[in-house]
């Protein structure tokens, strides 16, 4: 059952992304991107990452994309003519993206068992459960403290310093954005 | 005592440095310059005399090597800058410093009015330095330093009045022609190093007989290359053309360099390496043959020259030919003997000519005439105005013609006798003997012509100039007197047994020429044969002199201005068989063409400048231009390139 | 387990994002395609977090934060360029040309 739902939302994501990159108007592109993000949020839920799904909707779709929409509307770009690049670029794109996707789509064949086999020392006897200990720990944490707690424990204990530095990063971003966008007096 | 031999070089070297400094800072200090210049030479002569006496009174068993410093300690070549004092170098030492001192003294008077006085004495001293290094060197490279150095000084002194292009060209010609000979010397030196493993003369004498078989190709090649060097330095065919042109320099220079010392370097070289020439009979024959041919050839040219110095120049070439006949027959002592006597009488002839030219110059200067002071057709009857010069030059003429008991008779006679004797071994030497006899006849003829045209008959200088003609001052005539005495009595240093003498010079040089006698021994004629040879030589000499005197006196010699152009054979002789023109057409022009068109335009401008230098620059520019095409400033292009790189890394990590 | 398909979906979305970056000249649309790429990577992290533990989720957290900061500053720059050139067409912005 989950598989069907997964493929449904996966298709939705792919279609939305394609439409996003091909639309002429930036506003419509933004909206299709939001659609993609919603589909991804649904997939996160299916992957047992409910907290991340929530944050995706709140932060990404709710804040970042809104910012994009604000800027689009501020610049008042209107319905421009097609801004696709020339045929040489299209050809180059097809080549590059073709190669890229060929390399990466091979990932579809990975299962946890296979990944475990590749990561451990005795390929034929591994049980994913023994290799991926961390995953087990997360599940237990999740069962004990809830979804949010499973993320919060490593975030505020192991990764505390990066967390604090990120706050400074955000401060810098705010100041930078204000300075850059300020109208010269 | 012999260890002081380095002083003979050091004194003139100091003279050069001091006079050079004076030439730059105070060229007007002529007395100081004279003192330094002449004093250095006289001092050197004094040292040379002590060295000689020491060698005479306490003869060493082997040549004395005075090593001055370690020069080239390179691998298996351990070469010192050293002087070799033995019997041969002692003789050369005396001749160079002795005759050199006399010529320096003469120059004081001759060059008195010249603004380049200090420079002249500086160069002259430097020349003596190099000449002494040449004869004293104990190994080929040291000798070569002297060899090249005298070439340099010859260039500097020939082109002394370089503001006149003719003089500068003559200097260049001398240097360049000499270089061709130097190439021969160097190749020979390399071959000797290759075969014998050493370039010292003492080692050469030891090892050569063991290493080289008599007549082998190796030693023949070496000696022929050495002889090429000799033809350059001693003006033999084919490299003699620089010597007549060298008369463009001051006359004392011609006397010192082109009569008494530098041109004898070739003869000295053959005498020094006599062991090699003795082991290569073919080369010795070539040496004698070239000498004979040159002697005859130059003598014919001298018959029709009108410039007094040119006659003497060709005479020098001819007499050098005689010396090479001498060393080519294996009679090395005879060649050296003629070298010594020739130094005396040729220096006297040149200095005497210098006195004459000096007087003619003064005469023409007083009347502001532009006539040629060196042309014999403008002279005549100078005997009454310059009696001392006349009598001294007459002595020298008798010496060169081979009239006994003057010096030239003994030396020339010995050479001819040696050639005749060698004819018994190899008949071709009879031909050389015959050529030598004919040359003797011609020599006497043209010398008599010179004396007659210059000093006898009636004076053609001009009525107004006549009153200014006079004998040179004592500072110039004094050296002439000394040289006159030497020309008269110098023959007695090697009086052969036929005349009751002890052949002093020959015995003196025996330690040096011994190896040659071992391989190339010569049985000198004696008894009746010798009598006929000697008698014949004297008869030839006297006959030539009388013929020349009569022939010249008989015809009315016009002055140079009125003289009609020569025709026919006379013209060919006067124009020296057009040899210079032939060399120009065959050698010089193609070489200049090659340099200009091929090497300059094609190679240097086209290949080196165009392809290599500019081409590399254009290549860099091209590559840079290609690189600049990447910097479009357009973000899209940058993104593409970025992704290409990322793709590549991904592939490297995964694949 | 949905590991394989999730990773493949991530790859496809990433490729689409790359194609968009290469094809479009409008600066804002370019940024949105970059966000699309970041989302694809987030999906990859989340899929593997099931095996490798909560550090995957933490990474997603940080990626989103940085994406937010980057979007803010980037859009401010675009506004600045728009004020200057009255256009956000990246084909015209080539002052760094060599």
Image (cartoon, helix red, strand yellow):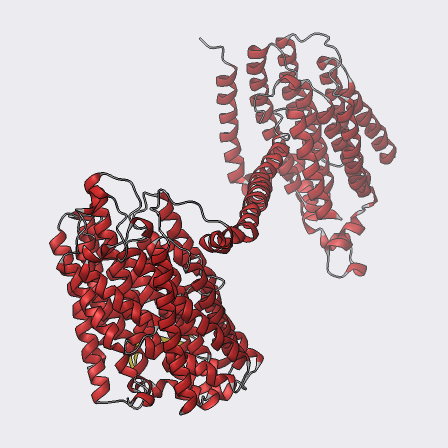
State the count of labels.
0
Task: Find residue B317 and report its image quarter.
Answer: bottom left
* Residue B148 in sight in this render: no
Question: Which residue appears at 17% of the width and 68% of the height?
Answer: B42
Task: From the top left corner, tell me how far across and down residue A150 is, in percent.
Answer: 64, 39
The one nearer the camera, C95 or C16, is C95
* Residue B570 in sight in this render: yes
- Identify whether B284 is placed above or below A130: below
- Identify whether B142 is placed above or below C10: below
Question: Which residue appears at 73% of the width and 28% of the height?
Answer: C17
Task: From the top left corner, tell me how far across and down residue B369 is, in percent.
Answer: 26, 39
Task: List the single residue furthest toward the front.
Answer: B554
Question: Which residue appears at 25% of the width and 69% of the height?
Answer: B395
Question: Is A120 left, or right, of B579 in this rendering?
Answer: right
Question: Which residue appears at 51% of the width and 30% of the height?
Answer: A169
Question: Is C74 left, or right, of B14 in this rendering?
Answer: right
- Identify whether B588 is placed above or below B365: below
The one nearer the camera, B94 or B348, is B348
Task: Find residue B349 and report its image quarter.
Answer: bottom left
Q: Name the quarter where the N terminus of chain B is drawn.
A: bottom left
Question: Is A96 left, or right, of C95 in this rendering?
Answer: right
The one nearer the camera, B567 or A83, is B567
- Identify whether A48 is placed above or below B351: above
The one nearer the camera, C9 or A61, is C9
Task: From the top left corner, tell me how far across and down residue A47 is, in percent.
Answer: 76, 36
Task: From the top left corner, tell me how far across and down residue A108 is, in percent.
Answer: 82, 41
């Amino acid at each position: 059952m989950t598989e069907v739902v997964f493929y449904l939302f996966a298709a939705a994501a792919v279609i939305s992304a394609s439409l996003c990159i091909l639309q002429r108007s930036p506003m419509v592109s933004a909206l299709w991107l939001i659609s993609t993000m919603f589909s991804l949020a649904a997939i996160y839920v299916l992957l047992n990452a409910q907290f991340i799904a929530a944050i995706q909707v709140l932060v990404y779709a709710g804040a970042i994309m809104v910012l994009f929409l604000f800027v689009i509307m501020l610049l008042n770009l209107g319905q421009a003519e097609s801004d696709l690049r020339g045929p040489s670029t299209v050809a180059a794109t097809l080549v590059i993206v073709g190669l890229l996707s060929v390399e990466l789509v091979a990932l579809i064949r990975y299962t946890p068992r296979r990944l475990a086999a590749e990561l451990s020392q005795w390929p034929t006897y591994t049980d994913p459960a023994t290799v991926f200990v961390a995953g087990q720990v997360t599940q237990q944490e999740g069962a004990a403290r809830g979804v949010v707690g499973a993320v919060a424990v490593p975030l505020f204990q192991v990764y505390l310093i990066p967390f604090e530095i990120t706050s400074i990063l955000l401060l810098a971003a705010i100041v930078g954005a204000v300075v850059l966008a300020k109208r010269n007096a | 005592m012999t260890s002081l031999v380095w002083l003979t070089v050091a004194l003139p070297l100091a003279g050069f440095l001091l006079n050079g400094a004076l030439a730059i800072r105070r060229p007007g200090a002529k007395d100081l310059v004279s003192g330094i210049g002449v004093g250095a030479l006289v001092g050197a002569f004094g040292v040379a005399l002590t060295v000689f006496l020491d060698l005479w009174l306490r003869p060493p068993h082997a040549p004395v090597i005075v090593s001055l410093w370690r020069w080239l300690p390179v691998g298996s070549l351990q070469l010192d800058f050293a002087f070799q004092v033995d019997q041969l170098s002692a003789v050369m030492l005396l001749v160079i410093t002795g005759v050199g001192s006399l010529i320096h003294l003469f120059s004081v008077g001759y060059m008195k009015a010249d603004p380049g006085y200090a420079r002249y004495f500086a160069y002259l001293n430097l020349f003596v330095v190099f000449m002494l290094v040449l004869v004293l060197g104990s190994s080929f490279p040291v000798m070569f330093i002297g060899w090249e150095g005298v070439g340099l000084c010859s260039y500097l002194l020939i082109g002394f009045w370089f503001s006149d292009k003719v003089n500068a060209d003559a200097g260049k010609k001398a240097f360049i022609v000499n270089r061709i000979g130097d190439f021969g010397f160097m190749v020979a030196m390399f071959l000797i190093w290759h075969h014998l493993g050493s370039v010292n003369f003492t080692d050469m004498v030891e090892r050569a007989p063991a290493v080289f078989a008599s007549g082998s190709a190796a030693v023949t090649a070496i000696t022929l290359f050495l002889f090429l060097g000799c033809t350059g330095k001693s003006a033999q065919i084919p490299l003699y053309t620089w010597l007549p042109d060298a008369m463009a320099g001051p006359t004392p220079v011609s006397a010192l360099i082109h009569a008494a010392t530098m041109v004898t370097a070739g003869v000295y070289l053959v005498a020094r390496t006599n062991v090699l020439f003795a082991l290569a009979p073919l080369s010795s024959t070539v040496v004698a043959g070239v000498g004979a041919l040159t002697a005859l050839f130059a003598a014919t040219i001298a018959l029709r020259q009108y410039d007094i110095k040119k006659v003497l120049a060709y005479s020098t070439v001819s007499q050098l030919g005689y010396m090479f006949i001498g060393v080519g027959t294996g009679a090395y002592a005879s060649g050296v003997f003629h070298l010594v006597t020739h130094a005396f009488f040729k220096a006297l002839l040149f200095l005497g000519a210098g006195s004459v030219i000096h007087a003619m110059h003064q005469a023409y200067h007083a009347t502001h005439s532009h006539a040629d002071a060196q042309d014999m057709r403008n002279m005549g009857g100078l005997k009454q105005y310059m009696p001392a010069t006349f009598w001294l030059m007459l002595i020298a003429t008798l010496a060169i013609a081979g009239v006994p008991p003057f010096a030239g008779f003994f030396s020339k006679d010995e050479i001819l006798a040696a050639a005749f004797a060698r004819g018994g071994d190899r008949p071709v030497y009879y031909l050389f003997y015959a050529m030598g006899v004919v040359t003797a006849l011609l020599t006497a003829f043209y010398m008599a012509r010179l004396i007659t045209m210059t000093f006898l008959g009636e004076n053609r200088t001009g009525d107004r100039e006549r009153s200014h003609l006079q004998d040179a001052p004592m500072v110039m005539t004094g050296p002439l007197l000394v040289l006159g005495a030497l020309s008269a009595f110098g023959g007695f240093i090697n009086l052969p047994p036929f005349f009751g003498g002890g052949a002093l010079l020959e015995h003196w040089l025996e330690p040096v020429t011994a190896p040659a006698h071992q391989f190339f021994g010569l049985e000198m004629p004696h008894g009746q044969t010798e009598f006929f040879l000697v008698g014949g030589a004297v008869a030839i000499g006297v006959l030539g002199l009388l013929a020349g005197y009569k022939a010249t006196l008989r015809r009315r010699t016009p002055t140079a201005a009125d003289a009609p152009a020569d025709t026919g054979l006379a013209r060919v002789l006067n124009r020296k068989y057009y040899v210079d023109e032939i060399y120009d057409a065959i050698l010089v022009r193609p070489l200049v063409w090659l340099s200009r068109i091929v090497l300059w335009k094609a190679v240097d401008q086209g290949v080196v400048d165009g392809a290599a230098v500019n081409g590399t620059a254009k290549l860099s520019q091209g590559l840079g231009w290609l690189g600049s095409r990447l910097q479009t400033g357009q973000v899209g292009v940058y993104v593409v390139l970025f992704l290409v790189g990322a793709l590549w890394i991904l592939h490297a990590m995964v694949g | 387990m949905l590991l394989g398909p999730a990773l493949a979906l991530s790859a496809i979305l990433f490729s689409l994002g790359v194609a968009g970056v290469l094809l479009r000249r409008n600066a804002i649309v370019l940024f949105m395609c970059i966000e699309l790429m970041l989302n694809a990577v987030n999906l990859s992290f989340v899929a593997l977090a099931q095996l490798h533990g909560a550090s995957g989720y933490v990474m997603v957290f940080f990626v989103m934060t940085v994406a937010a900061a980057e979007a803010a500053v980037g859009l401010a720059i675009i506004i600045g360029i728009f004020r200057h050139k009255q256009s956000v067409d990246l084909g015209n912005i080539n002052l760094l040309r060599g």
